[in-house]
Structure formats: C-alpha cells, structure tokens
Image: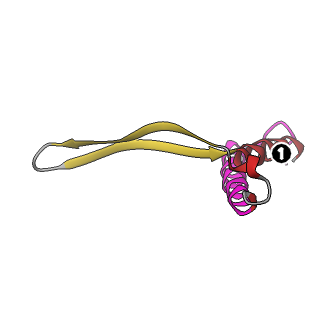
Amino acid sequence: MRGRGNKSPWILIILLVAGLIIGGLIGDLLKGYVPILDYTKSIGLNPTELNLGVISITFGFLVKMNLAALIGLVLAMIIFKGV
C-alpha cells in the first residue's frame, strides 16, 4: 500500500493540464462578466520554419494563458497536495 509521500508525478501532470484547460475555458466563458479573467499572456517560441528543399520542418511552442487558467493551475496544485 502506498503512503502519502509516494505520489505519482503523472497524477500531478494530469491535474496541472486539466487545471489549465478547465481554467482557460472558464475564463473564456466568463470574460464578458469578469473582464480581468480575460487578461492573457503568451509565453513561448513563435513558429519558425526550416525549409531544406526536400523536407520542411516547423518548430514552435506557444502557451497562451489567461488569469483564470493560472487560478486553475494553482487549484490543481492544491488538490494534488491534499490527495
């Protein structure tokens, strides 16, 4: 039987992703009523293309996070600590 100190990192990752997605959706739904939830910040690398003639590769990673997604992320961490 596992103790409280043996929490799987996969559970943390799943909770964090779920918190970000659900928080982002709630922020998009409520932005008309609570405008501060729509404050969005983009973090990452804009897409860049490497064209070698025969093959074309696109690199990029962009995270657009609003305030509600950040709140969902914090709540996911709190839930993980409590489980």
**Camera-side residue: 76 or 23?**
23
Secondary-structure class at tag 1? loop
Looking at the picture, how far across and down is residue 29, in whole percent?
72, 63
In the current view of this chain or complex, which residue is farthest to the bottom? 29
Badge 1, how many Cα within 10 Å: few under 14, some, many 20+?
few
Asked if residue 54 is among those painted magenta in the image, a careful observer would answer no
Q: Is residue 77 left or right of residue 28?
A: right
Magenta stretch secondary structure, dominant: helix
- Using the image, determine if residue 21 lies above or below residue 77: below
What is the three-letter code of the residue carrying label 1?
Arg
Residue at screen point 87% across, 40% down: 4
Residue 72 screen position, x and y as percent: 76, 49
Residue 56's place in the image compared with 5, above or below, is: below
* Residue at (79% x, 54% y) in the render: 34
**Number of numbered markers:** 1
Looking at the image, can residue 69 be seen?
Answer: yes
Q: State which quadrant residue 59 falls in.
A: top left
What residue sits right under mark 1 in the picture? 2
**x and y percentages locating residue 16 in the rendered image:** 70, 47
- Tell me if residue 28 is in the magenta stretch: yes
At 83% from the left and 45% from the top, the residue drawn is 2
43 or 6, which is in the foreground? Answer: 43
- Name the residue at 67% across, 44% down: 39
Q: According to the image, what is the colour scheme of the structure?
A: secondary structure
Picture coordinates of residue 38 (x, y %)?
68, 50
Q: Is residue 68 visible?
A: no
Instruction: Residue at the far left: name it.
Output: 53
Q: Which residues are magenta?
A: 1-29
Report the side of 61 relative to 32 (left or right): left
- The answer to whether 83 appears left or right of 38 in the picture is right
Q: Quadrant of residue 77?
A: top right
